Image (cartoon, rainbow, N blue to C red):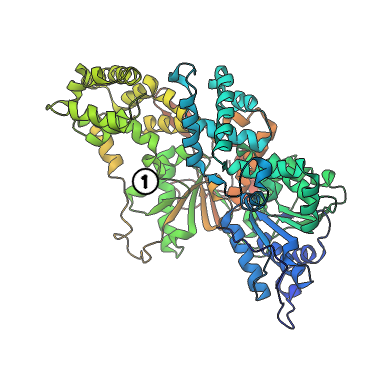
Amino acid sequence: MSRRYTLEPPSLVIPKGLQIPYEKELNPDQLKVVLEAEGPSLVLAGPGSGKTRTLTYRVARLIEQGIPPPQILLMTFTVKAAHEMLLRVERLLKTKPEGLWGGTFHHIGNLILRRHAEKLKRTPAFGILDEEDAKDLIAACLEDLKTSPTRTRLPQAGVLEAAFSLSANTGKPLDEIVLRQYPQFAELIPWIEKAAQRYRSRKEKGNLMDYDDLLTGWRALLQDNPALKERYAEQFRYLLVDEYQDTNHLQFEIIQLMAGTRQNLCVVGDDAQSIYGFRGADLNNLLSFPKIFPKTTLYRLQTNYRSTPEILRLANATIAMNQRQFPKELTALKASGPLPAVVPATDARQQAVFVAQRILELREEGVALNEMAVLFRARFQSAEMELELAKRNIPYVVRGGVRFFEQAHLKDVLAHLKILVNPNDEISWERLLKLQEGIGSAYARRIWEKISQGAQPLQAALKNGAGEELPVRARTGWKRFQALLAELSSRSRKGQPPAELILTVLKGGYEEHLKTHFENFRDRKEDVEQLINLAAGYRESDRLLSDLTLREPFRGETIRGWEKPDELLALSTIHQAKGLEWAAVFLIGLVEGQFPHPKSLNEPEELEEERRLFYVAITRTKRELYLTYPLTRYTYQRGEVLMRPSTFIQELPDDLLELWRLGAQQPADELD
């Protein structure tokens, strides 16, 4: 949790004779920020340029100059980052700066709202709803709306929570959010708005706030109470904000209000690493900063401590293609290394084989597994990779999530095949029953107990099972499930392959389930479609299920030289990898239609964000970079499809890359 210091007058005593040797510990660009960043200051910090170091030295410098810690406010995005910066300040000063305000936006908002809760119709002891609590309360609100339309197409609480949150953080009306992000619910907008109003009322009545309320309430306090706004603007003489490119409209308004007329505001960020537009982050907050604060001083941190010159030349060439940016040129301190390699593969399978083999070679050369990462644009692109790693017993961890085949929606789909192969699979039966409308754990258990009394649970379920004992709503869900089971059973008896069975599940109601239950249903549908493509290589469901179930790698016991039990290869989406670094990075699936994302092709601003995502991926590596793409992709319904390399590869100068031909002894000399 972010550390919170008291607001009482400071008791800080700087150790006698303390003088931090700034000139020795900072480069000239960092030193300029630390010593001179007065008034509105925009610090453009390239990847690996030491922005955290610069910020913490700036805070230490202010305190060393005699600025009382309670007059400094340091805000960032994660609890871990806030804790790390505050700890570094303590180490620099060799004492705890009592009274310093530092933490995430939500943490600071919570501290302020506790002092003025009555102005927002709360008491200082208000409760805070985490994401799951918020979903539960929204679900309760939906139960209150007895006059709701037919329940078969209603969005679930998780979808509504995401929509409410995006509306709050972007400042856009809820109906606009629904039309843009969830067009399948357009006709339900009046009902959704009614649910939002009910949710607000229940929170007020229960003396509750969710995470978004901590920020909207903070903004409201400052907007509606000029004296309070002046009080905080006077108290905080220095505002410092980290990762400014990730701020949304709501956070920008708070920053602007807190800066007051003094505008002693120092923000640190990198427009080239703004990749969270889908979450509501607004790049214009950074690009427009000098216009909003006309006396802005611009600083650039361009010395990179992470990567080789070859990596940085590629990164510079990539980001130069974007129009909306503050131009920067990263320079390297590290010695020269190998050229980044571009590696075309016949298909995703050969791509995975190459990556796995190269990982083992690097491991033999002394690069630890935890110094390597496989990155991808979309989650479904890791499927073949995970299967190949398992086959070779290469231990890995998926950052920010579970392994591909362990995701809930894929387990849902596979559960249908499991009960066809093994009708006595109690776990799969109950999983599927609880997916049906109106059937919870209690009814699922009751149905299973009834249909499992005989030797043939599937046949018992098809004959009726416990359907006649269910209430009307649950009975509707049960009948739909029975119809799907009957079709699957018939197709299975006719020998249809598992890919066709999974497609039947998707079209037989599960796609609708994804739409109503998940705010990222398109991504989840892509995952299911990828599962269908993988299943196309199997004629029998039991073989598919066995291979997927037995894919778990051993923890490296069978590979000589595996010494650390926690030495795991990282698999990650690029979004999850931001802020991290490895000695070697494999960026897979670089083909048109996957990266950049298809929806960005006709939207210049979205295409530029996709290119920034590519830039972030490139700059995660210290030394070795492999850009791989399959020349073909097999899809169950279209067969083999030819693929083109990503725009982001095609637009790069040939002399910055080395083409590797799989199967050749040496890398090719030049790109085709």
- Viewer-proximal residue, 249 or 123? 123
Residue 228 in the image: x percent, y percent?
Answer: 77, 49
Q: Residue at x 18, y 32 (%)?
A: 424
Q: Is residue 3 visible?
A: yes
Q: Position of residue 526 (x, y in %)?
A: 46, 31
Task: Name the foreground residue: 607 vs 112.
Answer: 112
Relative image position of residue 615 (x, y in whole percent): 63, 47
Foreground residue, 597 or 239?
239
Residue picked out by circle 1: 388
- Quarter of the image holding residue 647? top right
Point 33% across, 53% down: residue: 393
Quarter that holds the N terminus: bottom right
Q: Is residue 464 left or right of residue 609?
A: left
Element type at mark 1: helix
Q: Residue furthest bottom?
A: 17
Q: Relative to 240, does residue 616 appear above or below in the rendering?
A: above
Residue type pointed to by label 1: Glu
Characterize the local packing of mark 1: few (<14), some (14-19) or many (20 or more) Cα atoms within 10 angstroms. many
Measuring from the top left, give residue 645's x and y in whole percent: 56, 36
Which quarter of the rendering shows the C terminus? top right
- The answer to whether residue 595 is visible is no
